[in-house]
Image (cartoon, rainbow, N blue to C red):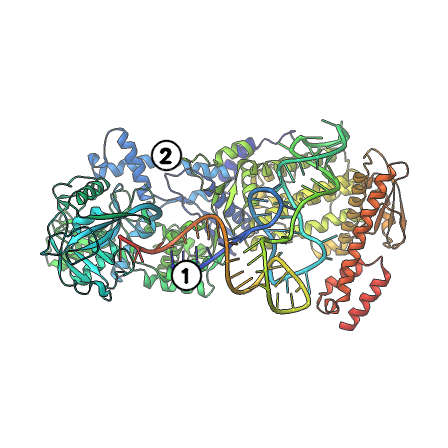
Amino acid sequence: MMDKHYDAKSAEAKWYPLWEKNGYFHQEPRDGESYSVVIPPPNVTGILHMGHALNQTIQDILVRWRRMQGKNTLWLPGTDHAGIATQNVVEKALRKEGKRRQDLGREAFVERVWEWKKQYGGTIVHQQRMLGNSTDWSRERFTLDEGCSKAVAKVFTQLYNEGLIYKGNYIVNWCPRCGTALANDEVEHEANHGHLWYVRYPVAGSALGAKGELNKDYICVATTRPETLPGDTAVAVNPKDERFAAIVGKNVILPLTGREIPVLADDYVEKEFGTGIVKITPAHDPNDFLVGKRHGLEEINIMTDDGHMNELAGAKYVGMDRFECRKALVADLEAEGYLDHIEDYDNQVGHCYRCHEVVESRLSKQWFVRMKPLAEPAIAAVKSGEVKFVPERWSKIYFNWMENIQDWCISRQLWWGHRIPAYTLCGERGTGNGEDELVFVAETAEEALEQAKAKTGNAALTLADLEQDPDVLDTWFSSWLWPFSTLGWPEKTPDLDKFYPTSDLVTAQDIIFFWVARMMMAGIHFMGKPPFKNIVIHGIVRAADGSKMSKSKGNSLDPLELIDAYSADALRFSIALITSLDCDTKVNKEKFEIGRNFCTKIWNAARFMEMQEANIAERVSMADIKDLTSDEKHILWATDIACKKLGEILENYRIQDGALAVYDFFWTQICDWYVEYAKDAPDKVRAFAVLRDVFFKALKLLHPYMPFITEEVAHQLGYLKDGETIMLAEFPKGYSDEEKSAWGLSEEVYEFVNAKREAITALRALRAEYKVSPAVFVKATIATDDNRAALEVESLKKAMRAEAIDFTAAGADLPMPSKLTKFGTVYLSLDGLVDKTAESKRIAAELAKLAGFIKAFEAKLSNENFVAHAPEAVVADARKKLADNKEKVAQLEKLAKLFA
RNA sequence: GGGCUAUUAGCUCAGUUGGUUAGAGCGCUUCCUUGACAUGGAAGAGGUCAGUGGUUCGAAUCCACUAUAGCCCACCA
């Protein structure tokens, strides 16, 4: 006997370990169509948030559905080593002990991070199990594991040998707090309410003039970053700017330093902005850097790698933080009369995506990947339709980025990550900015040594003479290989053969550039084929007010708390139901009650069936049933529709529509109508045989969305025995044509029952309007030409709580109150049930409504084109609607004939 | 500065290629504790589909413009 209440916690605790232990998630390559997905690997430092819940629910729905379809289905899990994030977490822990990573040294620190990973890195992996993810845990991967590391080394080496990786001195985004370079897309731009400082640069040989207009004595420069002034090596104007033509080629004096710097002409300068004169600081601004290259300027780096001023900034400022220095320097400029004026100015300032520190543009030596050659085939793969975005519009954003792609800075000055497989001879590193230093790039140190021997002609070299590049690679340099490195590449494996390219990649919009675009490039370049066929992009989960969820704001929902409060199935179903692929999803806790209530409904419906079946002595099989009632035919037909519809919906990734369809099917069709019918069915044995069949199909349809309760109920109701699982049951396809004809199912019967229900609803509405208690049995009359109607009178009487129902011909002139339905006009006999004043009001309203209805059709009929262009279905329906009005039907037929 | 998206019921959102009376959940109103379920059932109120113009026999749906909101990209000091 089923418990009165569904105990989600024990069901979840029971089934998940069993599924995993029985290897239901595991799949080896085998014959037949494959379906494979790699999970977007969460950071090892991560904990499960609503974004994961959404992302993984979508994937699990797709994966469970495909597995039930019998496909060779693999969902591969894993985590990302998340360079900066993880290193920051461990450094933070160290700080509590009063230590820095430098105190431990590189080796010990990395060891420490691995320890941390061992201890806490499993958190999210454990939490993913709570969601019910059917990932093949036996294949769990980590971006820093041996296989992935091998792939990274091979890829780096190959790209280097192909000339697609180079090393150079460039301006990069630098996070002074993390002490590392960042890629362009790791920088988040935020609005900043700042100032524009106007600073006077005296023309060489003249004293600083009085405050006022620009004159011969000084020129005025506008800057948002006065603290970089000591690094200026020129000022520039636009070559077409006549105002300053005379001064180009002369020198000006850099305030506070006395240094003379030239005035240049360069197209980069906008005439309209500021004063039309720009200070050029090649070591601290990417544009200035380019200007400097064009004009052969010196690059003066005035900052340390942690954002403090160095000795080149001037003795007074050495050691100051850059923002502290800004204040001090502005004060000094003002004191010495160099500060002209200050304006408020709003601009965008870059922040580190990890620690949110203001990013510094910094000149340094880094490794880069040439992206253009990799991007071209990746663009082509989407243009040709080989790879599709779902929804399609994301391809535009992909193209926009890909077509304007910049080289990718891949080196990071961190310790946690894949160390760059580049070697130099000891002592040769750090000798300068020369780009011609001897670098040996190879997958292993031994191979690098061979190269070194060959290049130098010194056969006596040993590994001890080689020094590996101290930098590590950007985290995304391992994630962009994820779809094939996890399947065994660079080895040739059966897994790669079978599961590459993967089928669907499901991810949020925010990592299209970081990850998706780069996987496309790597997949095509190294595997010869794009890494997936469809890229499914979903929105971001937001708080109820539309803001981003964040712990600090306190507006975040914890999926684990929701699971605890409502169950994993409730979380999954709710999020599937409220999420559209097209936009972001706003959630609050109450929304998850939908899923919880649905679980309750399923459980209670199952209990009802169990109880009723206990009273039924015999059971008939579906093969033996015959002479079905119209209601029984209806639910079988509806089930057939639901099965076909859900499959079609999921083919198109319409997760939300699917949830809605299956919800409506179960709740409305099965519970509200069929179960109510079954309570008073003429032949309970048959009625429950039908319910039993339909119910199991419904559970299977629901399983991808709600794995736990469907498994539990399927076992409770005896559909499955111990050792069996709904997970591997065949996804229902609906009924065969043979079955349908044996049972006498047809669309006509289905529609007949729909119409009948409309009549039932109409009578209920009449009762409600006239305040006739459900306890009172009424008399009803239905005007219809459907000759089967009379046969249904017994079931109608029960549903309508009517002591008698009379049938009369359609078009009969019934007294009010009545309601027009597809089935016919329903009339409630009110004799003695209701007061007459209310009735007369009601009659007037009803008449007005009917008049409006007929008028609408008259308007359509008067328009000849309506018939000419209206689809057959519309005309057919107009026929039905006008059934009561013979005259109008004749008019319609005439017109229809005319235009046929 | 470039690009994308949205605007439909009090709230959160559906509405597939234009086609009968624009839907759901929550909230609200009324009734119902009838043996599966009150986390429920029945009935109901509530919409000038942001605005203007256009295409069409027909527009929430297609086009143009306007307004408002949001997101992404971008080196303008």
> Which residue matches tag 1?
A399
In the rendered view, tell whether residue A55 sits above or below residue A215.
above
In the rendered view, tell whether residue A891 sits above or below residue A681.
below
Instruction: Answer few, some or many: residues within 10 Å of disc 2's Cα (few below 14, many 20 plus, some between 14 and 19).
Output: some
Q: In which quarter of the image is the C terminus of chain A?
A: bottom right
Whole-number angstrom distance, CA of label 1 to CA of label 2: 39 Å
Image coordinates for residue B63, horizontal then vertical, percent: 54, 65
Compared across the picture, whether A579 is left or right of A80 comes to: right
To which chain does the residue with label 2 belong?
A: A
Compared across the picture, whether A170 is left or right of A839 comes to: left
To which chain does the residue with label 1 belong?
A: A
Q: Would residue A628 be visible to someone looking at this image? A: no
Q: What element carries label 2?
A: helix
Instruction: Answer few, some or many: residues within 10 Å of disc 1's Cα (few below 14, many 20 plus, some between 14 and 19).
Output: some
Please tell me which residue lies in front, A149 or B4: B4
Count of numbered circles in the view: 2
Q: Is mark 1 on a helix, strand or loop?
A: helix
> Which residue matches tag 2?
A120
Q: Quadrant of the N terminus of chain A?
A: top right
User: Farthest residue toward the left?
Assistant: A205
The mark lying in front, picked from 1 and 2, is 1
Compared across the picture, whether A846 is left or right of A376 comes to: right
